[in-house]
Image: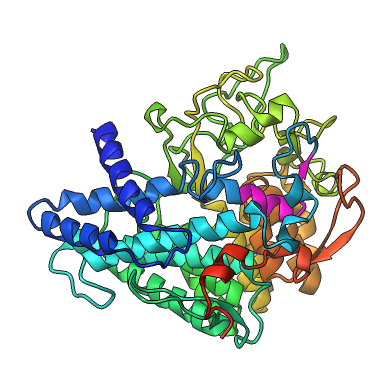
């Protein structure tokens, strides 16, 4: 049944993709006909609407969804690698094949003509186009739904639209300033003509409105797979949006939302044997089935995808770029490692230090295909994580610290560290922290906990940090880059500028 739904979803994705020309907003006669046909067909077969949203979800993990055939073009996890390298926490430790070298060199962020600047723009606006198409199939942005199924679909569509806009704000703007800076064009239908850039205030308000509506619409939605956006995912996305805007009222809401995620959902913080590979005296792994960050059934994963053989993922995938136990670039000559300064900052009593090999700093004991045979996994069946509970424990601590609730912030931080340190004595130092030192520690723990998951970049930007590259970087080693430097943010790509004459009005 899952394979049949996947086939339907791919067909729907083809409709979405064929409607997206080089200028994503270029109107095509068959675009409206296709949506009208789907709308009419869905009246007698509502499952077509479910297949449509499944098509949008498949965009998140299929290759080529950024509009190229490049081997770094494979959906959200591809841009998680972009983010990790831009933050400097992930090191490109070899350039035999060259993928990501213009990201690691900070060249792509300063050249609006290259594919690396175009792919995220193309991908996220494709998600937006798909979400807008589904919203139109459901009657439009303000339509009142008559049954729970359609209501839940509307909630998913609005959450996905906000998700895409959020990542566009991160990659294509330096961060939230006073709100008056013009950053991105907003599209809430598939038929609106080319739009000029809206202000940050307008874009953020649009995202918040979508996510507030999604949270209400997704009440009572019991999803059948973690790939689907449910109410918890929508709350998580809203937490990120509000934290990035960062007003005092926003931070209060972040505390409320993250408290709800941590306290009222079935997810839990991963235990030590789920975080790092452990070995017996003979060097044999003892927790092959629980560790590896490779299974969507993980008790902390809130949002992720169960990758099946039918999806056809192989070298062009996150695992094909990062994991040495997969037939991958990491195995063949372009390894990815943790920044040495960040590795050195991991305390001796912290089990997460063992996620990385001390000699080459590769994450072989954090992420791995279960068989752990170098270069073996050809057809990727190890799963993708998009969101997990630990993110919101840390975001909760961060928001509380910024609000001056330092005791509560330290309690939240220690909730995580109690599962990461060998003994309680190893995290007693947290009690003495306050002010900027406490915020620094929360940011550091975010970088350590979420290494390789694309989240350090988000923390760097919302916390307005400066990063200094460690000695193991091939490029720019020892150099420092602020959150608002040109190196850390893409320019709007040339293709969009050429196809949107009103962009800068």
From this viewpoint, which residue is outermost toward the top?
Answer: 282
**209 shown above or below 278:** below
Of residues 7 and 386, the one drawn nearer to the viewer in this rendering: 7
Of residues 383 and 138, the one drawn nearer to the viewer in this rendering: 138
| Quadrant in which the N terminus is drawn | top left
From this viewpoint, which residue is outermost toward the left?
Answer: 44
Q: How many labels does the image show?
A: 0
> For the point 28% across and 37% down, which residue is it?
7
Segment colored magenta: 80-92
* Residue 422 in view: no
Q: Could you tell whether 204 is left or right of 15 in the image?
A: right
Q: Could you tell whether 501 is left or right of 4 in the image?
A: right
* Residue 127 in view: yes
**453 shown above or below 29:** above
Residue 265 place in picture, x, y as percent: 40, 55
Residue 79 place in picture, x, y as percent: 59, 51
Q: Residue 349 appears in which quarter of the rendering? A: top right
Residue 257 place in picture, x, y as percent: 47, 68
Q: Residue 244 appears in which quarter of the rendering? A: bottom right
> For the point 68% across and 17% down, which residue is it?
280
> For the point 50% across and 55% down, which residue is it?
123
Q: Is residue 85 shown in magenta?
A: yes
Of residues 30 and 241, the one drawn nearer to the viewer in this rendering: 30
Q: Could you tell whether 105 is left or right of 108 in the image?
A: right
> For the point 86% across and 53% down, which residue is it?
469
| Quadrant in which the C terminus is drawn | bottom right
Residue 114 place in picture, x, y as percent: 67, 55
Q: Could you tell whether 272 is left or right of 109 in the image?
A: left
What kind of colouring is applied to the model shown?
A: rainbow
Q: Is residue 374 shown in magenta?
A: no
């Amino acid at each position: 049944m899952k394979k049949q739904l996947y086939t339907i979803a791919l067909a729907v994705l083809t409709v979405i993709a064929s409607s997206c020309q080089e200028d994503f907003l270029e109107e095509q006669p068959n675009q409206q006909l296709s949506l009208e046909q789907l709308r009419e067909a869905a009246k007698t077969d509502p499952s077509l609407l479910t297949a449509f949203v499944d098509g949008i979800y498949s965009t998140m993990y299929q290759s080529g969804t950024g509009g190229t055939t490049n081997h770094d073009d494979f959906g959200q996890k591809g841009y998680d690698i972009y983010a990790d390298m831009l933050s400097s926490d992930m090191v490109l430790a070899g350039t035999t094949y060259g993928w990501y070298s213009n990201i690691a060199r900070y060249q792509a962020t300063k050249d609006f003509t290259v594919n690396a600047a175009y792919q995220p723009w193309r991908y996220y606006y494709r998600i937006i186009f798909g979400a807008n198409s589904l919203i139109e199939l459901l009657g439009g942005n303000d339509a009142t739904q008559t049954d729970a199924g359609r209501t839940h679909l509307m909630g998913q569509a609005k959450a996905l639209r906000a998700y895409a806009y959020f990542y566009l704000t991160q990659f294509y703007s330096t961060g939230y300033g006073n709100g008056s800076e013009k950053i991105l064009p907003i599209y809430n239908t598939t038929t609106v003509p080319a739009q000029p850039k809206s202000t940050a205030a307008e874009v953020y308000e649009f995202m918040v409105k979508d996510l507030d509506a999604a949270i209400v619409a997704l009440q009572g939605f019991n999803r059948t797979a973690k790939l689907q956006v449910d109410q918890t995912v929508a709350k998580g996305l809203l937490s990120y949006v509000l934290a990035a805007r960062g007003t005092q009222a926003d931070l209060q809401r972040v505390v409320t939302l993250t408290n709800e995620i941590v306290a009222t959902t079935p997810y839990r913080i991963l235990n030590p044997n789920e975080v790092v590979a452990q070995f017996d005296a003979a060097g044999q792994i003892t927790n092959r089935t629980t560790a590896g960050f490779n299974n969507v059934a993980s008790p902390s994963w809130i949002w992720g995808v169960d990758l099946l053989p039918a999806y056809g993922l192989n070298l062009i995938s996150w695992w094909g770029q990062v994991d040495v136990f997969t037939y991958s670039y990491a195995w063949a000559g372009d390894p990815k490692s943790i920044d040495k300064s960040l590795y050195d900052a991991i305390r001796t009593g912290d089990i997460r230090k063992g996620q990385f090999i001390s000699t080459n700093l590769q994450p072989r004991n954090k992420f791995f295909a279960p068989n752990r045979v170098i270069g073996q996994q050809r057809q990727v069946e190890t799963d993708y994580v998009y969101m997990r509970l630990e993110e919101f424990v840390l975001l909760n601590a961060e928001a509380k610290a910024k609000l001056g609730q330092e005791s509560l912030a330290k309690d939240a931080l220690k909730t995580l560290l109690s599962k990461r340190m060998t003994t309680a004595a190893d995290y007693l130092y947290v009690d003495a922290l306050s002010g900027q030192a406490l915020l620094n520690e929360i940011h550091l723990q975010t970088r350590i906990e979420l290494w390789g998951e694309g989240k350090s970049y988000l923390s760097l930007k919302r916390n307005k940090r400066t990063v200094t590259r460690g000695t193991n970087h091939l490029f720019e080693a020892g150099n420092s880059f602020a959150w608002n430097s040109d190196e850390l943010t893409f320019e709007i790509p040339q293709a969009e500028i050429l196809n949107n004459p009103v962009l800068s009005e």
